[in-house]
């Protein structure tokens, strides 16, 4: 349903155990083909000693704020994300069209989403009305932000590291558009934060991935069993879904009796009750929306149990359960 995806984009609002865990350090020019080579054979454009470390940034969420820097350099960036709120939060990052700022977003784009949810709750609107409503009530530039990543859904009291590439200077926003228990958007309650990005390093040392995941229109490919412990998942966005909003990928801990259909329903903000706190599962982080061809990393410490990778976009199809063993 393209209209819905457009709406979403307007709502400025990722038994084979890869035990060969520690690959060689990769410069950002490393290709997938290169990754398949042995560590000894991996060509490097720049010696490791000359690579700049990934920029590590502390990000904290509360109700209702995103505590983050106001300025950052371009380049690979790790969000060391802690959720100190009581509700689920995420931190999606996108670049605005040149010349636009958080003031423009708050005045011209974000408010359009309130009447939509009110209309959906009351039954006066259906999902089919969302796209046309936004086309009439949001300027074109509101459709044209560039999603670069950020840290995925995180339950209260948890921490995670998400690494992604901020590729160009510009005005970026961090946003959480989870809904409060009363249905109000976190965005409009204070969870929109502007970051001005200036030119940074070009050759950086990227995380060593222990596992690889790829998100495509047919689903998610990756390991179905992993060992307990600290892991860094490399998440490649292989394709874009139909419509405007690219894929993201979130990690959820499944419990005995977790209703997967309920989880998939919850991932879709256009559902009344969708993305509305509290979530039906514990979220452990993830990577936020990125266009096809990009990738990011999620570093988490996993205890034995059952888990789920799931995207906000088309969650009923773009998901993959996996098991963590001793
Ligand atoms: Cu939030």
Image: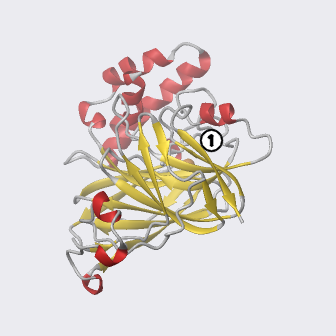
> Which of the 4 quarters of the picture holds residue 19?
bottom right
Q: Nearer the viewer, residue 192 or 177?
A: 177
Please state which of residues 68 and 14 is positioned toward the viewer in this rendering: 14
In the picture as drawn, the residue positioned furthest to the top comes out as 124
Q: Is residue 177 left or right of residue 76?
A: right
Tell me where residue 206 appears, x and y as whole percent.
Answer: 36, 70
Q: Quick check: can you spot residue 77?
A: yes
Q: Quadrant of the N terminus?
A: top left
Tell me where residue 188 appears, x and y as whole percent: 49, 42
Quadrant housing residue 303: bottom right
Looking at the image, is 85 positioned above or below residue 246? Answer: below
Q: Which residue is mark 1?
A: 180
- Residue located 36% across and 55% down the image: 295
Residue in the foreground of this view, choosing between 112 and 56: 56
Element class at badge 1: loop
Residue 63, horizontal then vertical, whole percent: 60, 54
> Which colouring convention does the figure follow?
secondary structure
236 displayed left or right of 50? right
Q: Which residue shows up at 54% across the image and 35% down it? A: 315
At 25% from the left and 36% from the top, the residue drawn is 141
Instruction: Determine crowd level at label 1: few under 14, some 14-19, many 20+ residues with C-alpha closer than 10 A.
Output: many
Q: Residue at x 37, y 39 (%)?
A: 246
């Amino acid at each position: 349903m393209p209209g819905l995806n457009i709406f979403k984009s307007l709502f400025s609002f990722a038994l084979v155990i890869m035990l060969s865990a520690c690959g060689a350090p990769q410069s950002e020019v490393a290709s997938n083909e290169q990754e398949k080579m042995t560590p000894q054979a991996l060509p490097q454009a720049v010696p490791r000693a000359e690579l700049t470390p990934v920029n590590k940034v502390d990000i904290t969420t509360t109700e209702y704020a995103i505590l983050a820097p106001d300025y950052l350099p371009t380049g690979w960036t790790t969000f060391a994300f802690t959720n100190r709120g009581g509700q689920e939060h995420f931190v999606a990052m996108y670049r605005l069209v040149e010349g636009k700022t958080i003031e423009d977003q708050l005045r011209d784009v974000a408010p359009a989403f309130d009447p939509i949810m009110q209309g959906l709750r009351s039954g006066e609107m259906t999902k089919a009305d969302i796209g046309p409503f936004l086309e009439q009530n949001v300027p074109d530039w509101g459709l044209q932000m560039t999603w670069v990543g950020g840290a995925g859904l995180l339950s209260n009291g948890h921490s995670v590291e998400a690494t992604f590439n901020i590729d160009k200077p510009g005005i970026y926003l961090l946003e959480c558009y989870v809904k409060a228990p009363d249905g109000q958007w976190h965005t409009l309650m204070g969870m929109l934060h502007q970051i001005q990005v200036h030119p940074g390093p070009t050759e950086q040392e990227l995380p060593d991935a222990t596992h690889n995941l790829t998100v495509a229109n047919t689903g998610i490919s990756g390991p179905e069993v992993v060992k307990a412990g600290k892991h860094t998942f490399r998440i490649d966005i292989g394709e874009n879904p139909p419509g405007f909003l690219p894929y993201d990928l979130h990690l959820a801990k499944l419990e005995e009796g977790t209703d997967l259909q309920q989880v998939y329903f919850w991932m879709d903000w256009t559902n009344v009750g969708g993305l509305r706190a509290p979530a039906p599962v514990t979220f452990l982080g993830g990577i936020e929306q990125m266009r096809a061809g990009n990738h990011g990393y999620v570093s988490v410490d996993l205890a034995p149990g059952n888990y789920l990778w799931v995207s906000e976009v088309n969650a009923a199809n773009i998901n993959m359960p996996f098991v963590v063993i001793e």
